[in-house]
Every structure is written in C-alpha cells, then in structure tokens.
Image: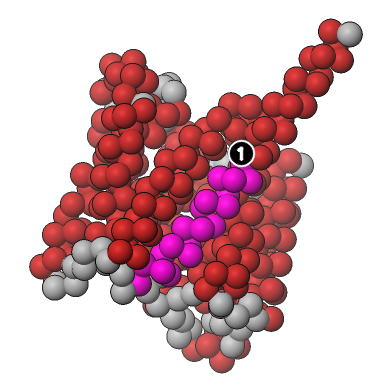
Amino acid sequence: MNASTSEGRAGGLFGNAYALLVFTTLCWGGNAIAGRIAVGEISPMVLTTFRWIGVAVLIVLFARRRVLTDWPVMRRHLPFLGAMGAIGFTAFNALFYLAAETTVAINIGIIQGAIPVFVLLGAYAVYRTPVSAVQIAGVAVTMVGVALVAAHGDLATLASLAFADGDLLMVAACALYAGYTVALRRRPPVSGIAMFSVLAMAAMLSSLPLLAIEAWAGRLMLPTPTGWAVLGYVVLFPSFVAQICFLRAVDLVGPGRAGLFVNLVPIFAAALGVALLGERFELHHGLALAFVLGGIWLAERGRKA
C-alpha cells in the first residue's frame, strides 16, 4: 500500500515536471516570435535592457529573501557571476534580437536548437571532457542542419559562404550561451533562483552600455504599444516564469532529463512561426530540423555510452 502510494506520488511529480518543461520550452520558442514582432516596434537594445529591468523588479518582489539568504556566498563570486550574466544573458539576448531583424523565427529556433552541441564542444575545449566517435558524428550532423538553415537550402550559398547576417548573429549568440552553460560547472553552491537573480541583475547593468551605444548611433526606438506587449511577454514568460519552472523541473527530475527538453525549442519556434507569423516552412527547414535534432540525439546517445 505504501509502495503504491509512493509510486503514485512520484508519477505525479514526474508528470508535473514534464508539464513544466513543455511550458518552459514553449515560452522559449515564443521568444523567437517575440523577437520578430519586435522589429519596428522596439529597438533591440531597448528590448534587452528593459527586459532585465523588468526581471529585476520581479526578483525584488518575489525572490529577494532567497537572494539575501545566499548573498554571503554569492558575494565572494561576484566577478564570475557578473561575467556569466553579461555573456549568457546580455550578449546572448542582444545578438538574439539583432538577429531577429534580418532572419525569420524558424531559422532562429532551429539554430538555437544547436546549443547542446556547442556545449559539447565547449566542454571538450575547456575541461577535456571525453568525446566519443558517436558524439563527433552527432556534432557533424547538427552542424549540417545549422548550415542548411543559414544557407536557406541553397548549395551555391554554402559554396560561397554568403550567409544572412541574422543567421550568423544567431550562431554567435548560441556560441556565447554555450560558453555560459559550460561555465556553470563552476557555479557557487547556492540555490538556483538566487543565482539566477544575481545573473539577471548583472545582465541589467551590463546591458546599459549597449543601450547607450544604440542611442549614440541614432537607432534607439522606445516601445510602441505593440513593443510594450512584446516586452511584457519576454519579461514575464521567457525571462521569469519559464526560468522558475525550469529550476523546479530540474529539482524534480534532474538536469539530465530536464536538459533533453530544450530540444523542443526549435520545434515550438518553427510551429509558432508558421501559425502566428505566416512564415513558410520549406523543405530545407524540415531537413535542417531533422539534422539538428538527430545530431543532438546522437551526441546524447554517445554521452550515455
């Protein structure tokens, strides 16, 4: 009786975790759509800076106690945490929203799906984490998918290396986020929400120079009504609620299982791009998505082996 009850509770917890993970990746896939809608409604650096200002306000309202509890430990690691926030949050999002000005949401989502492979390469470069032949095959397959997206399925473009600016910016953004992910191995022993709070504060501060540069270049655009709606979405869902859901899911099922769900981001981004923006899902998108997800599957299979 007790064993059955225990199993039922465990099943319920796992069910909740998976629902949280699906919701999280849906929010992150929706960020690609938000980036496209933002074009002409709010400039990229205004969106980046205001995003983290909004998150900072929410943190003060809902997470300040956890931050204060873990502050003595985090204070000793502030330079590291500041760099993490600047690279993983500010730089990634700045490039993400710049990319959205010149490429479609489907491309953004599929290229973003390659982050796990960038992480694999980064872990090998920094920590010499062993890489199997199957994982190498997975990296190669995923890179073929990314190249297909960046070239829009045109072999002549691949031969000339004449890729769209937005796609190249998105590749750079993914490389930076992978670097942030690899560096998480050195995170201080504090709660996830407290660490996220400090990273978000660092992102807010490090985004201010980018905002100043955008204003100096005459490209600053304050939000229109649509821009405010986009800003509200990215603050509340991809930046805050999704992060909390992901942290909770990691507590329930562990980082390994939770990490696999990130593979849903390009699928959601592609589906939402077609449904909400009327983007065309072409043959090269389907092939690229298959290569990216197949490569990640191979890399994960190789890691387990």
For residue 106, which quarter of the picture? bottom right
Q: Residue at x 68, y 38 (%)?
A: 18
Location of residue 190 in the rendering, given as x and y in whole percent from the top left corner? 41, 22
Farthest residue, direction front:
225
Secondary structure under the numbered disc 1 in the rendered image: helix
Q: Nearer the viewer, residue 161 or 132?
A: 161
Magenta part of the chain: 21-39
Query: How many marks overall?
Result: 1
Relative placement, left or right, of 14 versus 60 is: right
**Could you say where residue 55 lies in the image, as x and y percent from the top left?**
33, 41
Quadrant of the image for the N terminus? top right
Q: Is residue 142 visible?
A: no
Residue 25 at what x, y percent from top left?
57, 49
Residue 77: image quadrant is top left
Q: Is residue 233 above or below residue 266?
A: above
> Residue type at mark 1?
Leu
* In the image, residue 158 lies in the stretch drawn in magenta: no
**Residue at 59%, 45% in the rendered image:** 23
Query: From the image, which quarter does the C terminus lie in?
Result: top right
87 lies left or right of 265 = left
Q: Which residue is mark 1?
A: 20
Depth check: give the residue in front, 59 or 197.
Answer: 59
**For the view shown, which residue lies furthest in the right direction?**
1
Left or right side of 111 for 55: left
Which residue is rendered at x = 30% and y = 44% of the image?
54
Looking at this view, is 233 or 210 the one in front? 233
Give the prevailing secondary structure in the magenta stretch.
Answer: helix
Q: Percent position (x, y) of residue 260?
A: 65, 45
Whether residue 204 appears in this view of the structure is: yes
Crowd band around label 1 with a 10 angstrom C-alpha radius: few (<14), some (14–19), many (20+): many
